[in-house]
């Protein structure tokens, strides 16, 4: 007589419920952290919005600090899934096209208005009032993305990635993008007619890219001219 062995499904109903509760906690926590910041956010309010038991945060994440770290990872991943770093531009495309794609992707993540809208707000808070979670974010996500931008800038400048100019020029590109978000209250007061929650991303991406390419072209020509004057030797 053969015994019938029941094979357990990889995902039991209970497992699905646990995963859904975890997702709801991440979504609720992201909204709360974006609104009031890490320090003023309470586990009670997060659980209330997630319609979860007050002990759910400890069960799924351990404590509020680890929840916050996971929220940053989650929001970054969601944002990059929607707006990949180079969008749909081919890896073999010209560096100028890659730069345009990088700028547009960053702007769209910053000014996102959908379910992941709090990603831009979270990162803005981290820049102003950083937490210990920023260290892991830098190593896991931000440093690799910065490296890709430096590679693109180095191609345009026709210089090594390690050259200091690639670092400074990369910072200048990113600075233009974040300015329109960080300084929005000032911009709206200076130009009341531009009081929109979301700027024209395509138009802004074109401007930042064109402005940046003009500057990069200047630096590339200046370096070439300097080498001619010194016979190929840098001071």
Image (spheres, helix red, strand yellow):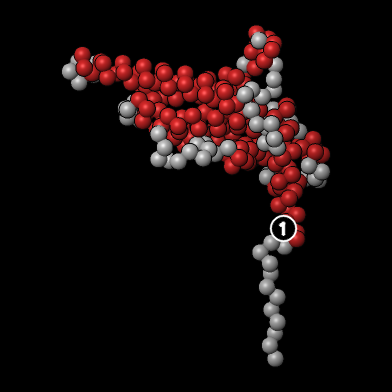
Instruction: State left or right for residue 64 relative to residue 95.
Output: right
Q: Is residue 215 above or below residue 80?
A: above
Q: Which residue is mark 1?
A: 15
Q: Which secondary structure, mark 1?
A: helix
The structure residue drawn at horizontal position 81% and vertical position 45%, both measured from the top left corner, is: 53
Image spot of residue 218 (x, y percent):
36, 16
Q: Quadrant of residue 51?
A: top right
Q: Quadrant of residue 35?
A: top right
Q: Is residue 65 above or below residue 202?
A: below
The structure residue drawn at horizontal position 69% and vertical position 23%, both measured from the top left corner, is: 197
Image spot of residue 133 (x, y percent):
59, 34
Q: How many marks?
A: 1
For the C terminus, the quadrant is top left
- How many residues crowd around disc 1 within 10 Å: few (fewer than 14), some, or many (20 or more)? few
The structure residue drawn at horizontal position 54% and vertical position 25%, both measured from the top left corner, is: 205
- From this viewpoint, which residue is outermost toward the top? 190
Instruction: State left or right for residue 177 relative to residue 195.
Output: left
Q: Is residue 141 visible?
A: no
Image spot of residue 162 (x, y percent):
35, 29
Q: Is residue 25 above or below residue 183?
A: below
Q: Is residue 78 visible?
A: yes
- Residue closer to the observer: 85 or 9: 85
Image spot of residue 85 (x, y percent):
52, 36
- Residue closer to the observer: 101 or 16: 101
The structure residue drawn at horizontal position 42% and vertical position 18%, both measured from the top left corner, is: 214
Instruction: State left or right for residue 181 relative to residue 40.
Output: left
Q: Is residue 117 above or below residue 6?
A: above
């Amino acid at each position: 007589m053969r015994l019938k062995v029941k094979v357990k499904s990889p995902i039991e109903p209970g497992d699905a419920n646990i995963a859904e509760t975890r997702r709801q906690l991440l979504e609720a926590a992201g909204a709360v952290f974006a609104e009031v910041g890490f320090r003023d956010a309470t586990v009670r309010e997060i659980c209330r919005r997630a319609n979860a038991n007050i002990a759910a945060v400890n069960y799924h994440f351990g404590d509020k600090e680890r929840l916050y770290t996971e929220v940053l990872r989650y929001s970054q991943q969601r944002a990059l899934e929607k707006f990949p770093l180079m969008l749909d531009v081919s890896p073999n495309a010209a560096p100028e096209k890659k730069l345009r794609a990088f700028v547009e992707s960053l702007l769209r993540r910053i000014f996102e208005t959908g379910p992941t809208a709090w990603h831009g707000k979270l990162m803005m808070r981290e820049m102003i009032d950083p937490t210990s979670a920023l260290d892991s974010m830098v190593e896991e996500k931000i440093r690799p993305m910065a490296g890709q931008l430096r590679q693109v800038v180095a191609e345009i400048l026709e210089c090594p990635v390690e050259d200091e100019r690639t670092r400074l020029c990369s910072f200048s590109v990113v600075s233009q993008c974040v300015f329109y978000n960080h300084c929005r209250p000032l911009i709206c007061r200076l130009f009341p007619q531009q009081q929109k929650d979301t700027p024209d991303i395509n138009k802004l991406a074109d401007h930042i890219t064109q402005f940046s390419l003009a500057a990069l072209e200047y630096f590339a020509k200046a370096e070439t001219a300097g080498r001619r004057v010194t016979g190929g030797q840098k001071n």
